[in-house]
Amino acid sequence: MTNSKPSKKAESGEQKLVRRRRAFFLFVIFGLVVAAGAGFASGLVTAKVEQGLIPEWAVYTVLAATAAGFIWFGYRYYHRIDELDLMDNLWANTVGIYVYVIITFVWMALDQAGIAPPPQHLPILISTIAASGLAYLTRRIGVR
């Protein structure tokens, strides 16, 4: 017996790459939109709690949902990237954690010595993200 349905034309390698790349970027855009929504929701809920309009447990619910979404996105992201991008991400994360630890412990030591004010979390966070981003971009442009 023969198949009476016409067969679909097989996808070329370039077509598969374009389809996978489009799906990946749509996934990242979806993650960014959800993260922006979570940020908006956490700000809105926090403001409503401060005004006494909703109970405090609502903040914990929004933060738990945000953390769960972040973990899910990270898990799925690392399953979608190839091994070279994974290595670039691992290097960037390693550099970021080193920067975080160094800045935090130096700042704490300077605070204990009375030379600097107590550590502030926002500058440490910004420095960590900037160092991780710079390490990632450096790896992506080919400095290995």
Image (cartoon, grey):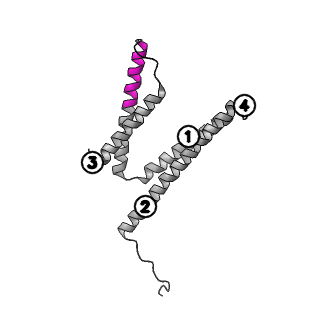
Query: As shown in the figure, which amino acid type bears the numbered disc 2?
Result: Arg
**Drawn side of residue 92 relative to residue 65, left or right:** left
Residue with the mark numbered 4: 52
Circle 3/circle 2 CB separation < 8 Å: no
Q: Quadrant of residue 19?
A: bottom left
Residue with the mark numbered 1: 67
Circle 3/circle 4 CB separation < 8 Å: no
Residue with the mark numbered 2: 20
Between marks 1 and 4 in the image, the one whose residue lies nearer the viewer: 4
What separation in Å lies between label 1 and label 2 (alpha carbons)? 27 Å
Query: As shown in the figure, which amino acid type bears the numbered disc 3?
Result: Gly
Counting other residues with Cα less than 10 Å from the Cα at mark 2, is it few (<14), some (14-19), or many (20 or more)? Answer: few
Residue 17 lies, in percent from the top left, at 38, 63
Judged from the image, the secondary structure of the residue bearing numbered disc 4 is loop
**Disc with the residue nearer the chain's start (3 vs 2):** 2
Counting other residues with Cα less than 10 Å from the Cα at mark 1, is it few (<14), some (14-19), or many (20 or more)? Answer: few
Query: As shown in the figure, which amino acid type bears the numbered disc 4?
Result: Gly
Query: As shown in the figure, which amino acid type bears the numbered disc 1?
Result: Ala
- Magenta-colored stretch includes residue 84: no
Judged from the image, the secondary structure of the residue bearing numbered disc 1 is helix
Residue lying at 45% horizontally and 78% vertically, measured from the top left: 8
**Disc with the residue nearer the chain's start (3 vs 1):** 1
Residue 80 lies, in percent from the top left, at 43, 54
Counting other residues with Cα less than 10 Å from the Cα at mark 4, is it few (<14), some (14-19), or many (20 or more)? Answer: few
Residue with the mark numbered 3: 142
Residue lying at 46% horizontally and 59% vertically, measured from the top left: 23
**Drawn side of residue 17 relative to residue 44, left or right:** left
- Magenta-colored stretch includes residue 110: yes
Residue lying at 40% horizontally and 21% vertically, measured from the top left: 107
Judged from the image, the secondary structure of the residue bearing numbered disc 3 is loop
